[in-house]
Image (cartoon, rainbow, N blue to C red):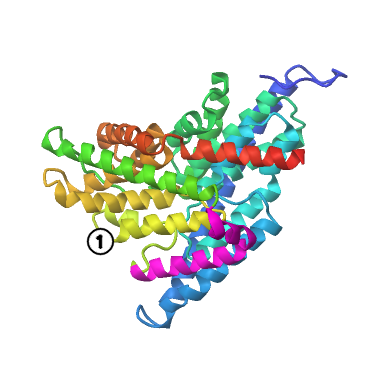
Amino acid sequence: MALTPKAAGVRPVWFAPAMQQMLFWGGAVLVALVAIGFTQAANAAQALFAHVLSHGGSHGVGRLAGFIVSPLGLAAAVLLTRRVFPGAQGSGIPQAIAALEMREARLVGVVLSARLALGKILLTLLGLASGASIGREGPTVQIGASIMHALGRLRGVEQMELRRALILAGGAAGIAAAFNTPLAGVVFAIEELSHSFEARTSGTTLTAVILAGIASLALVGNYTYFGTTTVTLAFGPGWLAVLLCGVAGGLAGGAFSTILLRAGAGFPGRAGRWVMRHPVGFAALCGLLLAILGWASGDTTYGTGYEQARQLVEGGAPLPAGFPALKFAATIVSYLSGIPGGIFAPSLAVGAGLGQWLAPLLPGAPAAAVVLLGMVGYFAGVVQAPITAAVIVMEMTANQAMTVPLMATALLAYAVSRVVCPTPLYGTLAARFLAAVEHKNEA
């Protein structure tokens, strides 16, 4: 998979392969650095919104600020997305998948560019500072793919196969650095991004992910996003939790994906025409709904959901009983508003809340174990990538002892979700995005 030498042929034969490897290695480290900076900025954006809400006490005027900040923030994010950074909306994973399917370099530049990467970062931060229930992992995939694609263009890469390898490696490195989970980055690239992409690119992808993981480890340490837990699930009656969490997670996750796909295709009738004519006004309305959901949940549905999931994983105080349903709704509202932002972290938080719901029904299983199974069941139901779901939860909680129950739950949830939502969320969104880009460029 070496670069094609220039016609003049004056460069040594080793130059192109060596430069190709340096391109992958340097790009992977750069992706990790950007992902780490993005993480710190996202934490600061959430802290800023929390500070606004806490002004004046939990029952003071601070909590009412959400009814102003969220509508204005989401409206501003959509306005900037449409006028300044078109193509930055949504998760970012469908854009990366669509770019892998594109045959023309000019079309890839429409969805993957340094400018779009910057817009993705800034607008996701604006969404988090406005209380949106979004994550940064999906955006980091598009950002990582954009960085690698931009480096390839600077290097003069013209081979389609190598260009796709760069995109794949950048997206996988983004996941690895965003979650500090290198193994999940590799599995995600194989299971979700690449699909039928040539197997011989796996070596370059693996190298990029490992280097991104090393850079992340060196700079921020071997931390776990959702804390650590040593809980185990002995084989026996406690495994009823696998069945219940798999079925419940698959049903709920499939329902979530179905809602996003149907609503994302456009609302019917007069409501749909109004949304198309007034996207900024619709975003403001979504912000108002977010504020209502946040008020009803005791401010637990705002943001990524990291703190709430960590609280449940580590056995902290229980969340409000309505948390999973309200977080479910807040994530749908945030996504449909049209702002940039992912669904990985919010989905894991919903799953943790689902596990808290189900734990009292399963006295034979430790509550902490049911929380983990709820996370992986719901997440696998949403993304329909069961191996990725199991590996991410395992790595993010540093609990290899739960690998088999997690995998079994994820596979069951995947099967159930496919019944509810036969078409995978990211694949369907990618096909729509690809069709829209091709139609726009043909016009």
Is residue 187 rendered to the left or right of residue 283? left
Please name whichever residue, 248 or 163, is drawn nearer the observer in this view of the structure.
248
Residue 278 drawn above or below residue 419: below
At which x and y percent is residue 127? Answer: 54, 61
At which x and y percent is residue 170? Answer: 59, 37
Magenta span of residues? 267-296
Outermost residue, right direction?
8
The residue at 44%/69% (across/down) is 291
Residue hosting label 1: 321
Q: Main secondary structure of the magenta part?
A: helix
The residue at 17%/36% (across/down) is 239
Mark 1 lies on a secondary structure that is: loop
At which x and y percent is residue 387? Answer: 38, 32
Q: Quadrant of the N terminus?
A: top right
Q: Amino acid at mark 1?
A: Ala
Q: Is residue 236 visible?
A: yes
Any magenta on residue 288?
Answer: yes
Q: Is residue 227 visible?
A: no
Any magenta on residue 358?
Answer: no
Residue 284 drawn above or below residue 27: below
Residue 7 drawn above or below residue 364: above
